[in-house]
Amino acid sequence: MQYLQQHGIQVHAVPGITAAAGICAELDIPMTHRGVATSVGFLTGHSREGGESQLDDTITASADPHTTLIVYMGLATLPLLVQQLTACGMSRDVPAVAVERGTTAEQRVVFATLSNFHSSIQEAKLKSPTLLVIGDVVRLAPGWQQTRDVAAAGGVTAAAASAVVQQEHDCARL
């Protein structure tokens, strides 16, 4: 908006909800939940040129096990994000979900633990726009357990199991 306004273009913001709230509601993931997560952190997966240290500090502070981390625009920097979070003490077993084109008919979802999050997203070939949700609240999503059940029954990867669960979910909508 600032860029457009600086170039003489009138802009009007229409109130709505953030993608994180819509996507979490769609997947039945509470952003906070008593005994699981007491706070939520929203951050961008990339920084402006010269702002890397600020982003690093924010990621370091976000490794709290009682915080749900919502990452916008984080696909390109996901390996670094995972490395930083685990270096700051976040468990590699923390559940996560990546949601491409959330709340649209083209929505695609990948559930995985932090340890195989990047590889599962690559296997599923998710593209931007994709929102990342990292934290123990992801375990509360029906899709988390369904993905685990499909993977265990079929001996498939989390990304493949997520694809099966997502197809079933899409069919249920029809």
Image: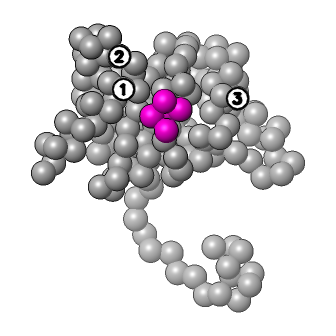
Q: Is residue 156 magenta?
A: no
Image vertical order of residue 91 relative to residue 73, above or below: above
Q: Which residue occupies 45% across, 55% down?
A: 18
At label 3, which amino acid type do we have?
Answer: Leu
Pick the front one: 54 or 82: 82
- Residue 80 rendering spot, x and y as whole percentages: 70, 29
Q: Position of residue 32 (x, y in %)?
A: 39, 33
- Counting residues from the start of the chain, the first of labels 1 and 3 encountered is 3
Structural distance between the alpha carbons of marks 2 and 1: 6 Å
Q: What stretch is highlighted in magenta?
A: 121-125
Q: Earlier in the sequence, mark 2 or mark 3?
A: 3
Three-letter amino acid code at the position of disc 1:
Ala
Q: In this view, does 22 lie above or below 124?
A: below
Q: Marks 2 and 3, how far apart in space?
A: 26 Å
User: What residue lies at 59% left-to-right and 40% top-to-bottom?
Assistant: 75
Check disc 3: other Cα within 10 Å, few if <14, some if 14-19, many if 20+. Answer: few
Residue sticking out furthest to the right: 50
CB-based contact (under 8 Å), mark 1 and mark 3:
no
- Under tag 2, what secondary structure? loop
Does the rendering let one see residue 136? no
Residue 160 numbered mark, or none: 1
